[in-house]
């Protein structure tokens, strides 16, 4: 529904209130413009559809432009000649002077001849005669009480989301090479390879060297500062106090600049970051064998560079980058395994084992070990994100419930050895692993049974991501039965005790762990792969089986339970601060909950909503929230299915949140998909 925010209507006369209240007059010009704009938008989103024709329309007493008046006079005269009536009685000029409304049946003129500001608003036109009725809220008051049949809605077909889906890549092929390979030579047999074809293959195998054009040193320094100020808090895998640019970590430095360039406030900077990301992948693939063979100190920075580069590819919004990340992910895991990073643990050290004279050396040694542990946790996070995005099994399947614990946040961010020692004393032994846990290479800590206060936020973050990957793997294997669901629910409830409290004045949850916890619950209750198919991810032709499964899910208690978590996620996202950057998974969380809400609305019937007073969920008890009240709010403060207007309002809200979310272009990509689900 289109409506101006503020408007002054002085041409409306008081006699307009005498109009027949059973007749809803519509402005012909605005309807034509609206139809033209809607059809052009529909042709782009729904190719092959017929243009929407609003048909004959009644025009009430108004003041059209002179050009439009002449056009009305000509059409009125033609109509009078057909029916033999007096043209003067139907002249368009009488619309300006007569006190009685005149109804005409018109053929719409071309849209380019009409004022663009005239829109067909479903409001009470009688109120416009008052010069004080200029507030939009006065026009919109009581809209929620208008019956749905009185609201003009378009039952649009399933939008063509396949081509705008965030994983879709346009076909880009070397047409000359394909033509040379596919066009047969009539003078040779199919098995022959002539010299021309051999030369073509030789040219294809030659490496095309692209000379990177790196930005200035000032830009690189700005990008490095921006990285540690904006991105490092949400993905802390580098020990910032001990990081110094050097020849050994040149690849890591470039990877840091690729993400830091997004925060420079320049579109050129973002383009430069994408170029650095692409150059970096080629450079790592060209040098990793030499670095591994030499066993130098450059291996760990190379793995760190690849890990941060993978994060850039996940968030850039470019389908080619996302495909590169998926293909490159296994390589990074392999390099980490060759360096035995998955077996690295902190040695048992107490405060008495740290002499002051060697404190700086001990601090730096501890920092290197901590970085290795956080590399492993970061790989687990990426593994779960990719499994959720592409709906396939995770790579890291062994010891899914056991992870190396990262140090406490205060210990990790200590800027000096003395501050580090003080933080280590305050945390006690929670930041290190007991001696008996480091005796064997394969020993790990089952963190589901560790005291809640002993885990750092980054460890809990990785643990939740691992649980999400476990849910996906279990569902794909067909083992997500009721006992397994109950076991996973218990794990989630235990991990909830380790989520930072929201009572702190400092940002208690910079990693968005609470949002990820709710999203993991929805993943346990909902097959996101099914819902993405149900909205048209694979094309406009949705199979009957997918529609039947989506309809069955929408009528189930699992759907109501999912909407319960959707509503909680929505509340948390709406109060996110503007300054800090959102966590890596936040854009995906908004996108998935929007898809979940849309499918629950689209595939549900009015009779599918049971009494909400009988709902009781174990997580609701832990949270201290009444699910019935929350679902009542999600349904528009009423029982039954939301109206089309209410559904569009929620969809637009999710799209708006994605548009305003941080610097990640993937959020804008998600927003374009959600916007296509609107029904107007």
Image (spheres, grey):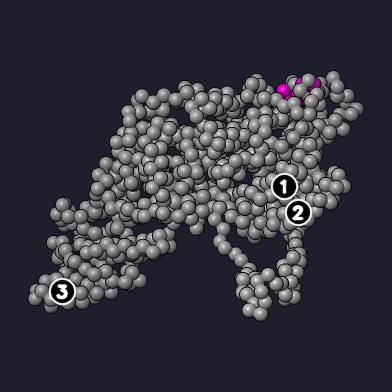
Mark 2 is surrounded, within 10 Å at the Cα level, by few (under 14), some (14 to 19) or many (20 or more) other residues, namely few
* 276, above or below 499, in the image: below
Q: Whole-Å distance between the Cαs marked 3 and 2?
A: 75 Å
Residue at the image point whose x is 22% and y is 52% from the top: 126
658 horizontally vs 260: left or right: left
Disc nearer the start of the sequence (3/2): 3
Q: Whole-Å distance between the Cαs marked 2 and 1?
A: 9 Å
Task: Specify the segment rendered in magenta.
Answer: 430-435
- Front of the two marks 3 and 2: 2
State whether residue 421 appears in this view: no
Q: Position of residue 247 (x, y in %)?
A: 84, 50
Q: Main secondary structure of the magenta part?
A: loop
Residue at the image point whose x is 84% and y is 33% from the top: 365
In the image, 226 versus 208, the foreground residue is 208
Quadrant into which the C terminus falls: bottom left
Q: Which residue is mark 3?
A: 79
- Front of the two marks 1 and 3: 1
372 horizontally vs 130: left or right: right
173 horizontally vs 285: left or right: left
State whether residue 446 appears in this view: yes
Q: Which mark is residue 285?
A: 2
Would you identify the image quadrant in which residue 18 lies? bottom left
Marks 3 and 2 in Cβ contact (< 8 Å): no
75 horizontally vs 175: left or right: left
* 124, above or below 241, in the image: below
Q: Which mark is residue 331?
A: 1
Mark 3 is surrounded, within 10 Å at the Cα level, by few (under 14), some (14 to 19) or many (20 or more) other residues, namely some
Residue at the image point whose x is 20% and y is 74% from the top: 75
Mark 1 is surrounded, within 10 Å at the Cα level, by few (under 14), some (14 to 19) or many (20 or more) other residues, namely some
């Amino acid at each position: 529904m289109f409506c101006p925010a503020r408007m002054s209507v002085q041409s409306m006369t008081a006699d307009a209130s005498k109009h027949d209240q059973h007749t809803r007059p519509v402005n012909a010009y605005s309807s034509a413009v609206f139809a033209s704009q809607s059809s052009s938008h529909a042709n782009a989103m729904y190719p092959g559809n017929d243009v929407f024709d609003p048909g004959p329309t009644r025009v009430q007493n108004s003041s059209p432009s002179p050009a439009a008046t002449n056009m009305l006079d000509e059409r009125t005269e033609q109509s009078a000649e057909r029916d033999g009536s007096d043209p003067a009685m139907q002249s368009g000029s009488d619309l300006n002077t007569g006190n009685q409304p005149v109804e005409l049946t018109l053929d719409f003129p071309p849209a380019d001849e009409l004022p663009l500001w005239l829109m067909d608003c479903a409001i009470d036109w009688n109120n416009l005669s008052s010069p004080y009725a200029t507030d939009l809220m006065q026009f919109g008051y009581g809209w929620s009480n208008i019956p749905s049949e009185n609201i003009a809605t378009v039952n649009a077909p399933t939008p063509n989301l396949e081509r705008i889906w965030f994983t879709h890549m346009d076909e880009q092929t070397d047409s000359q090479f394909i033509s040379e390979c596919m066009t047969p030579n009539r003078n040779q047999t199919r098995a022959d390879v002539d010299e021309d074809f051999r030369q073509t293959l030789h040219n294809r195998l030659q490496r095309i060297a692209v000379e990177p054009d790196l930005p200035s040193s000032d830009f690189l320094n700005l990008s490095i500062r921006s990285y540690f100020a904006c991105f490092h808090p949400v993905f802390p895998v580098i020990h910032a106090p001990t990081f110094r640019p050097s020849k050994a970590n040149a690849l890591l430095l470039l990877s840091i600049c690729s993400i830091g360039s997004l925060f420079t406030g320049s579109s050129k900077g973002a383009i430069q970051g994408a170029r650095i990301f692409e150059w970096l992948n080629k450079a790592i693939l060209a040098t990793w064998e030499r670095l591994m063979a030499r066993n130098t100190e450059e291996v760990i920075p190379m793995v760190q560079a690849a890990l941060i580069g993978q994060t850039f590819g996940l968030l850039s919004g470019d389908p080619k980058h996302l495909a590169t990340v998926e293909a490159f992910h296994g390589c990074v895991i392999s390099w980490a395994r060759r360096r035995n990073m998955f077996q690295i643990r902190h040695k048992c050290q107490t405060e008495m084992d740290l002499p002051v004279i060697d404190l700086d050396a001990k601090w730096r040694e501890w920092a290197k070990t901590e970085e290795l542990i956080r590399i492993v946790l970061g790989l687990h996070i990426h593994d779960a994100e990719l499994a959720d995005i592409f709906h396939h099994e995770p790579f890291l399947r062994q010891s899914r419930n056991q992870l190396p614990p990262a140090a406490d946040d205060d210990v990790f961010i200590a800027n000096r050895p003395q501050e580090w020692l003080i933080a280590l004393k305050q945390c006690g032994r929670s930041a290190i692993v007991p001696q008996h846990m480091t005796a064997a290479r394969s020993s790990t800590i089952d963190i589901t049974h560790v005291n809640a206060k002993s885990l750092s936020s980054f460890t809990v973050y990785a643990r939740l991501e691992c649980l999400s990957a476990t849910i996906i793997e279990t569902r794909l294997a067909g083992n997500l039965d009721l006992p397994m669901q109950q076991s996973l629910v218990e794990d989630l409830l235990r991990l909830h005790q380790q989520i930072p409290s929201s009572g702190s004045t400092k940002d208690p949850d910079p990693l968005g762990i609470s949002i990820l916890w709710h999203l993991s619950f929805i993943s346990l209750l909902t097959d996101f792969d099914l819902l993405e198919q149900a909205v048209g991810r694979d094309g406009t032709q949705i199979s009957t089986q997918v529609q039947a499964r989506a309809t069955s899910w929408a009528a189930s208690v699992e759907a109501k339970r999912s909407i319960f978590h959707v509503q909680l996620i929505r509340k948390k996202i709406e109060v996110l601060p503007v300054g800090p950057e959102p966590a890596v998974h936040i854009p995906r969380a908004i996108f998935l909950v929007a898809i979940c809400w849309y499918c629950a609305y689209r595939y549900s019937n009015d009779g599918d909503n049971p009494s909400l007073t009988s709902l009781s969920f174990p997580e609701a008890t832990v949270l201290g929230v009444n699910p019935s009240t929350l679902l009542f709010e999600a349904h528009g403060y009423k029982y039954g299915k939301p109206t089309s207007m209410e559904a569009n309002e929620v969809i637009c809200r999710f799209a708006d949140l994605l548009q305003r979310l941080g610097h990640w272009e993937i959020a804008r990509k998600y927003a374009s998909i959600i916007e296509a689900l609107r029904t107007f």
